[in-house]
Image (cartoon, grey):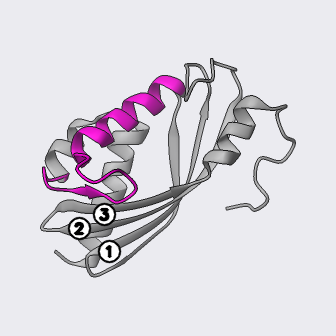
Amino acid sequence: MDAETNRALVLMVFDRAFNHGDTSVFDEHVPASGTDHQENPGTEMRPHLKEIVTMLRTAFPDLHFEIHDALAEGEIVAVHSTMTGTHLGPFMGVPPTGRPIKVRHMHFLRWQNGQNTDLWHLWDVPGLMRQLNGPQPAVISTYDA
């Protein structure tokens, strides 16, 4: 598949899974042998992604990922996004606060034959936890989209 097709697949998967909670998209586009490189070896990527989406959408029912940039070259798609939502369910030991959150993410995804075979992902977890645990900051991020 060409780079633009891979880019379109990433945008579709983000929208269906994270923005609408449709985790069946992972059954269609993540092979059983997929690797999430941020997880322990042997972690099955497909069920792990379903758990992550469920966890996030439970904690932040209005979860939304805004994609700022999605750049594709060959099999790799790089995505810069911002996750927003309202903390209405438990998250990582923090009871619901009702606070809005705004968290930057970077994803790098390898696509082969319409399948997301590899995932590398970075997100500002310390910044998220500050938003949930401390006084609500006037500025959530030091940079804008």
The kind of residue tagged 1 is Ile
Q: Are marks 1 and 2 in contact (CB under 8 Å)?
A: yes
Q: Which residue lies under the disc numbered 2?
A: 111
The answer to which quarter of the image holds residue 55 is top left
Left or right: 26 as drawn, with respect to 87: left
Residue 92 in view, yes or no: yes
Instruction: Kindly identify which numbered label has been placed on residue 76.
Output: 1
Magenta stretch bounds: 30-59
Q: Which residue lies under the disc numbered 3?
A: 8
In the image, residue 68 above or below residue 46: below
Q: Are marks 2 and 3 in contact (CB under 8 Å)?
A: no
Q: CA distance from mark 3 to mark 1?
A: 12 Å
Q: Return the disc, 2 or 3, that comes first in the chain's sequence.
A: 3
Please tell me whether mark 1 sits on a helix, a strand or a loop. strand
Instruction: Farthest residue to the bottom: give it.
Output: 74
In the image, residue 120 above or below residue 103: below
Q: Return the disc, 3 or 1, that comes first in the chain's sequence.
A: 3
